[in-house]
Image (cartoon, rainbow, N blue to C red):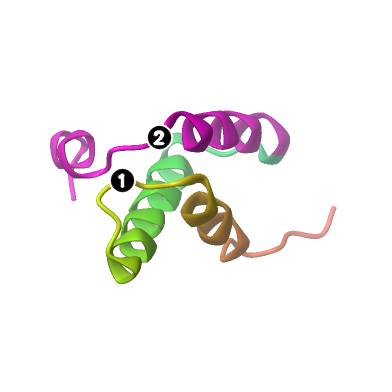
Amino acid sequence: MNNKQLKQFCNLDDQSILLLKQAISKLNLSARAFHRVIKIARTIADLEGSEKIKSNHVAEALQYRPQVDS
């Protein structure tokens, strides 16, 4: 899925956008990781039959990220 398709098919609600912004700052997500989280959240939303990506979908997608020891 390219950036154009990402904008077309991955509609986020306001709460999801806020959660992603917090994750970017706290987890230092790269642009690539940011897009990957959105794509995973889209898949989770599809499995639930949701047209929009909700904050619970984003939260679940963030949990699938590998843990890195500091």
Q: Work out whether mark 1 precedes mark 2 in sequence or the reverse, and give the earlier one.
A: 2
Quadrant hosting residue 11? top left
- Residue 5 on the magenta segment: yes
Identified by mark 1, the residue type is Lys
Residue bounds of the magenta highlight: 1-26
The residue tagged with tag 1: helix, strand or loop?
A: loop
In the depicted view, which residue is nearer to us: 30 or 34?
34
What residue appears at the point 32 percent right and 55 percent down from the top-left corner?
A: 42
What residue appears at the point 52 percent right and 45 percent down from the top-left corner?
A: 55
Quadrant hosting residue 6? top left
Cβ atoms under marks 1 and 2 closer than 8 Å:
yes
Question: Which mark identifies residue 52?
Answer: 1
Question: Which mark identifies residue 13?
Answer: 2
For the stretch drawn in magenta, what is the main secondary structure?
Answer: helix
What residue appears at the point 27 percent right and 64 percent down from the top-left corner?
A: 49
Whether residue 6 sits left or right of residue 68 in the image: it is left
Give above or below for 68 relative to 23: below
Whether residue 41 sits left or right of residue 21 in the image: it is left
Q: Residue furthest right?
A: 70
- The percent position of residue 12, horizontal first and vertical second, equals 36, 37
